[in-house]
Image (tube, rainbow, N blue to C red):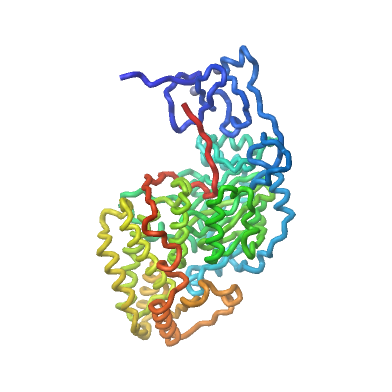
Amino acid sequence: MAAAPLYCVCRQPYDVSRFMIECDICKDWFHGSCVQVEEHQAVDIDVYHCPNCDDVLGPSLMKKRNNWHRHDYTEPNDGTKPVQAGTSVFVKELQNRAFASGEDILLRMRGEQVTQRYLERHGFHYPIAVTEMEGLGLKLPPTTFSVKDVEEYVGGDKVIDVIDVARQADSKMKLSEFIKYYTKPHRPKVLNLISLEFSDTKMSKLVEVPDVAQRMSWVENYWPDDSFFPKPFVQKYCLMGVKDSYTDFHIDFGGTSVWYHVLWGEKIFYLIKPTLDNLALYEAWSSSPNQSEVFFGDKVDKCYKCVVPQGTTLLIPTGWIHAVLTSQDCMAFGGNFLHNLNIGMQLRCYEMERRLKTPDLFKFPYFEAICWYVAKNLLETLKELREDGCPPPNYLVDGVKALIGALKTWLKREPSSEVPDNIRPNHLIKELTKEIPKYDLPICREHPTSPSTEEAIQGMLSMAGLLCSKTENVASSQEPWWPSPSQHLQLEKRDCEQHRLQGNKSLIDSQGNSSSEAWDNQGLPSPDIEYQYCEPSMSPPLHPSKRHAPNPHP
Ligand SMILES: [Zn+2]
Ligand SMILES: [Zn+2]
C-alpha cells in the first residue's frame, strides 16, 4: 500500500478538518495554523509564499482593493456592478433606508406573561419583545460577561465558524483567534460569530433558556432518550458580533422559532411576515443568481425595523423572514425550538429548504426523525383527549393534518432512513388519520370538579403542549393564519359551549374548504421532485444564511 502523501512544514497527511493553503511557488500545501494564516486571511493573498519560499522571494503578495461594495473587492469599480449585501457600502445604505416600524407588529409583554398557556390560547404568530425579563425563566451571565469569559468557559481550542461579513462567506478558526481579533483595537475586517452552540461546554450552566421555549420544545418533550439518532442541540447559542455585522434575510432552519437576548450592545432586526405571498417571493429570491445584489426588504409589501437594545429578549415565531444588523459590538444569547403551535408552517419551511437544496450544515438535525416521534406522541394525546370528551384545539387538528401529509410524502421518497426503528410508519399514519375525523361530533363534557383530577389532566395536556380547558383558537381555518396583533390582545375567554361550536366549525371548514394551513394546498413539492439523501450533519446547524464556504485542499 502506498503511503499517504505528506504536506506542510509538519509533514502530516491530509486532514479534511483543517484549513490548508497552497504555496504558489513550491506548490506544497500548508496548514493555516502551522504557517499563521487564518482562513479568512487567505482570500486577501494574491501570491502565497510559504515559510520556505519567502526566505528567497520575500513575503506573499497581497490583493489590491478596488471597491467597497462587492464581495470580491478586486473587481474594478467602474460603476457597472450593483452593491452586494454585507459590504461596507451596503451597511451604510441600510442604515439610511426607511422601514415600517417594528411597533406595528411587535407584541410587548412582560416576562411573566409569556407562557405556554398564553401562546396556546392566542397563537404564536407575531414577534414578542420582553424588556422586563423577570418571570421568563431566562438565566444569563451578568452584563459584565466578556468575550474573554466566553473563551474561558468554552475553551480557546474550539474550532468555530465565523462569517466574513463583507464577503458573506464562512471560515473556520479557533475561538482563541476570534477573541484575539475581537479585542484588538484595529479590526481589518468584520467577522461575525453566530453559530457557537455551547450546550456541551462549561458555559451551559450559566444559561437557562426561557421557560416557554423549554416547555414547548419538541426536542425537550418528545426526543426519546434511547433514540438511535443523536439528540439535536440547538437550544443554546452565543452570538458575538462586531459593529456592522450583517446577516442577510433568511428563515431559521426547519422553521424553528427562536429567542434572542441581547446581553450587551445592540442588534437591529428587519422582519417580514411569512404570508404565502412573502414566502413565495422569498423562495424565488433565495434561488436567484443575483440574490446578494437584491435587498429582499424591497421585494415585499412591508419590512419592519425593530431595534433590540441591551436587556431585551425577542421571540420570533415560525417562518418569519429576517435580516440582522449588529449596530454596536454585541453579545447575545439565543436558541431555536420546534413546537406544536405552527406545525404546518414548520413543515412548509422544511420543504422549502429542501427545494432550495440547503446544505445539511444549515438544517435542523434529524428533522424528519423528530416529526415521527412527535406523530407518535400526538397520537396518544389525541386519544386521551377523545377519551376525555375534549375536542382538540384547532391548531392541533390543523397541525396533525399537515403532519400526516408530510409523513406520507416522506415515506414515498427513497430512502426513508429517518423513520425511527421502533415506529411502524404506515400503522402510525393510519392511527393518526383515524383520530382526526372522530371529532366530527365532539362531546364537551363538564370538566372534572375535583381539583386534583383537573390538575392531573392539565399537567398531562400541558406536557403535550395542549390545554383543552377553555382553550380557544383564534384563527379559524378560513381566516388568515394569524389574528392581527390587536385582536390578539383583545381576546376574551369563551365558555365551553362556544369552544365546542368553534371546534365543529373548524372541522367543517377543514373538510369542506381549503385551510390556509393545510399541507395539501401549500408548499407541497411536486411528486417527481428529485430527492437526494445526505447523511445529516452531527454538529449543531450553522445559521442558515446563504454563504459559500471556500476551502480548497490538496
Ligand atoms: Zn502543518
Ligand atoms: Zn513554497
Horizontal and vertical percent position of residue 178:
59, 37
Q: Nearer the viewer, residue 53 or 242?
A: 53
Horizontal and vertical percent position of residue 28:
50, 20
Location of the N terminus (image quadrant): top left
* Left/right of residue 4 with respect to residue 474 in the rendered view: left
* Left/right of residue 430 with respect to residue 461 in the rendered view: left
The image quarter containing residue 88 is top right
Residue at the top extreme?
56
Q: Is residue 387 visible?
A: yes
Rendered residue at 59%/57% (across/down) = 322
Q: Is residue 108 visible?
A: no
Rendered residue at 73%/42% (across/down) = 79
Rendered residue at 49%/63% (across/down) = 212
Horizontal and vertical percent position of residue 305:
66, 60
Placement of 358 over or under 133, stated as above or below: above
Placement of 40 over or under 11, stated as above or below: below
Q: Nearer the viewer, residue 5 or 120?
A: 5
The image quadrant in which ligand 2 is located: top right
Q: Nearer the viewer, residue 491 or 12?
A: 12
Rendered residue at 42%/75% (across/down) = 393
Placement of 509 over or under 8, stated as above or below: below
Q: Nearer the viewer, residue 117 or 45?
A: 45
Horizontal and vertical percent position of residue 373:
34, 59
The total of numbered circles placed on residues is 0
Residue at the bottom extreme?
497
